[in-house]
Image: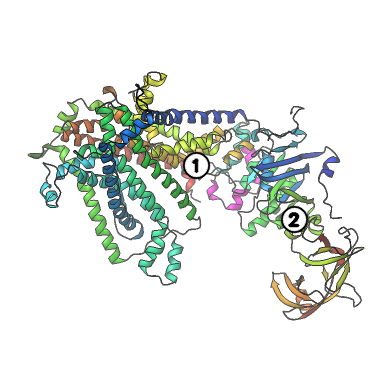
Amino acid sequence: MAPMTATVVAPPLRQRVHWTDRIGNLMLLGTVMLLGIGLIAPLLLILSKALYAPEDGSVSGLSAFGAYLASPALLQSLWHSVWVSVLVTLIVVPLAFAFAYALTRSCMPFKPLFRTITLLPLLAPSLLSAISLIYWFGNQGIAKEFWLALGFSGIYGAPGIVLAECFATFPHVLMILVTALTLADARLYEAADALGTSTLRKFFTITLPGAKYGLISAAMVCFTLVITDFGIPKVVGGNFNVLATDVFKLVIGQQDFQRGAVVALLLLAPAVLTFGVDYLVQRKQTATLTARAVALVPKPATSFDAVMTLYCIVIVALMLAMFFMAVFASFATLWPYNLTPSFTHYVSGLVDAELGGAMLNSLKLAACTAVIGTVVVFIGAYLLEKTRGFDWARPLVRLMAMLPMAVPGLVLGLGYIFFFNAPGNPLNVMYQTLPLLVLCTIIHFYTTGHLTMVTALKSIDAEFEAVSASLKVPFYKTFWRVTLPICLPTLLDVSRYFFINAMTTISAVVFLYSPDTKLASVAILNLDEAGDTGPAAAMAVLIAATSAVVTLLYMVLGKWVERRTQRWRNPSR
Amino acid sequence: MTRQPRVSEVSVTGNSAYLDLQGIRKSFGSFTALDDIDLSIQRGEFVCFLGPSGCGKTTLLRIIAGLETQTTGRILQAGRDISVLPPAQRDYGIMFQSYALFPNLTVAQNVGYGLVNRKQTHAQIAPRVEELLTLVGLPGSGGKYPAQMSGGQQQRIALARALATSPGLLLLDEPLSALDAIVRVHLRNEIRDLQRKLGVTTVMVTHDQEEALSVADRIVVMNHGVIEQVGTPLEVYREPASPFVADFVGKVNRLQAVAEGDHWFRCGSMRLQTAPGHGADFRPGREVALYLRPEDRVVGNVRDDDPMRCAGTVRHIEFLGGNCLAEVDVEGIPGQPLQLQYSLNQMDEFEVREGASVRFALRADRVRVFPMGAA
């Protein structure tokens, strides 16, 4: 069989590549190219724009960069961004920790209900809470007097931003902390009980250290979300400038791309830092948990459970008040004079303003992202985890898949302008088209989808591919018959995540639409800017309603898939 | 005489070897996982790779399977050079410790997984699957899902799946390690019987010496990426080629001694002569270690003039069920207590209790001698 010259020589032997494996390798190369075009190239262009030297050659790129950085306006925005973000983090993390503690360590009733209500803000763009705030405490707000009595001069500015961000970030922080507190080893508490440890001491010696990494991670995520968010400061910020709104004003308002790029880099810095810390923390987190850990089951304790229930009711009431104020206002005929419910804002504010197309565009974007994004992310993760060869490309893909988490949407969108609007780029036909919006959205939310898929794939026996090869079954058949069916529920989860985020995202796509591809979430921003707060609220409610309906549809689909394809998980013996 | 039986001697004797590994080396960066492995396996043979974790046994199996690629070296299977062939172009069936059964497919679909791809019709596959299930003792369970079966049953299904395509070589990667002790013993005998019946050449990786001794035709003892010894289970047990093998396979006493020439050794105030052919002679004055298994002693009818006669005091008894290990301080060999094996009946017969005096004779013909510090 083998050629006669197959003698053993110095360089290490390389296995001949089977043609089916070549398919996998080629597709891995495709993933590299996709992430290269959709992520790396735009980011590199931001860097080069920020360091761009003026044409007259009077100053070098670096000193121009330095000059922008040192401008007082920018320094002020930077300071604003940082303290607002820190303040929100300091408020939200303890509140969410107490809530997560109640959900995981108490025996209070209605846990699923509480949990579901806290997830409500995720269904709408983050600026929904800002719009609600205006109806509560704005110039015509129903509780304006209360707000002024608290000593604030008004809702616009830092107080409004902080309050709205607290509501917007709460569900994100809560999810992380619930996960961290769920991963508790009951044996530690039993050992502590056996040694007669007090409740307080158990909390400080077992609970807190156990949730330490979750707390760090939650704080980082909260800080990053606030500092990179631009919808809320745009709506309730007033004259209070932050970095995110600066980017928008510089790029859209003044068309000053270079200065915009410099600010974008500033935004990227804290995000990259938190991303790095978070990554290290996550790695440690997995290492501290053993497979032998026994799940902790909370024991009833009447007074503690009652306090926790009360606390959760207060938080949930606040969230409902926030959410339903926008709903209520969107149906009010003429705020605040005529509160009779009507569809005025929906009909004259949206339909007559020809914003139905925007809704349709959003649905198209969400549907395309949900389908294409899921397929791309799943195949990428599969190739990474389950195929062999092309070892040089694997760390590269891993890194590039993690990177989008650290890139704020605004920065990504700006990079897309630079890259896809460049005259020399053959891809510039995509500029302002739906496909580009889809690409941008997939990349923007790539990391979470990727990590979910990787986790699911890692839980599948690593030897399936080896067994298949020994049985002469090509990898794609095993992919189709085994891996894909096992992963279907995860695929649905990721797909839903993509859909909801595509519906509600603003930051990246705000730079990339044309009148034909305008999106519903961006329309909220434009309506609000034009003073049409009523229709803006109506649009936000419409998006939230769509997300809610789609979530329900996904749940139904999930049940169906489970019945049809996951019967093997709990077969009747 | 401590010379290792070189494996190459076997391969030189003919091209009849079914699987021939020549100079296999595997390095991961600067770490050498396997160093110059030569091994020939005959057709129909059951070979065990035995060694502690990290000795390279699994790496060697995965190289044979093509799941890893050796840095250098050649692999011939049935005369065909498979050194750089991808797994799909090699001829073997494999079974992993994790079973690696496809959980979403039924047992029948699992077993028939490799057959479907061979363009066989459903009518051809169904009876073959049932035949295989009968072979592994699970007839009629084709419609179940793996999650409905016990660990031992799942491993049998994995075995049936590996055998379905009638491969020339069966590779077993620690197949029994995840099972309960009783199921493990049961299943290893079944695997052995099945292997005999089908005559398929089999390589099994294990870290369990008892398992290797009970099923293998030949055992390949490995340590730190090299082969320490290749031999039948009896050879490996009775005539360990190195201190490592003596220590790893079975229990052994290790006594410090000094060579006196002509196969004579002094251990404390005792002198003993090993049988010719049980270890090289050492020049007088050389420090050596004597290796003696706990059962290599005579307890009844010890003659007074037996030069190997010893007396001692029992310090401690370890109860192991049918047998006991008595730790004995031997007169004349201070500081080097010996572990001696007594059956439960012998314990009564010779009144072996903690603190009791015992008389016995060492079986010098079983003593193995290695230079000091070789372990």
Q: Which residue is drawn at 50% across and 58% down?
A: A292
Q: Which residue range is magenta in the image? A: B126-155
When the figure is inspected, residue A277 is found, relative to residue A431, above or below; the finding is below
* Vertical arrangement, residue B213 with respect to residue B36, above or below: below
> Residue tagged by mark 2?
B213
Q: Quadrant of residue A350?
A: top left
Please name the amino acid that badge 1 sits on.
Leu
Mark 1 residue element? helix
- Whole-percent x, y for residue B310 in the image: 84, 75
Q: In this view, does A505 lie above or below A567?
A: above
From where the camera sits, is residue A413 visible?
no
**Which of pointers 2 and 1 indicates the residue nearer the eye?**
1
**Towards the viewer: A149 or A468:** A149
Q: Name the residue under label 1.
A: A457
Chain bearing tag 1 is A
At 75% from the left and 77% from the top, the residue drawn is B314
Residue A223: percent from the left, percent from the top? 33, 46
Could you tell me which residue is drawn at 78 percent across and 51 percent down? B229
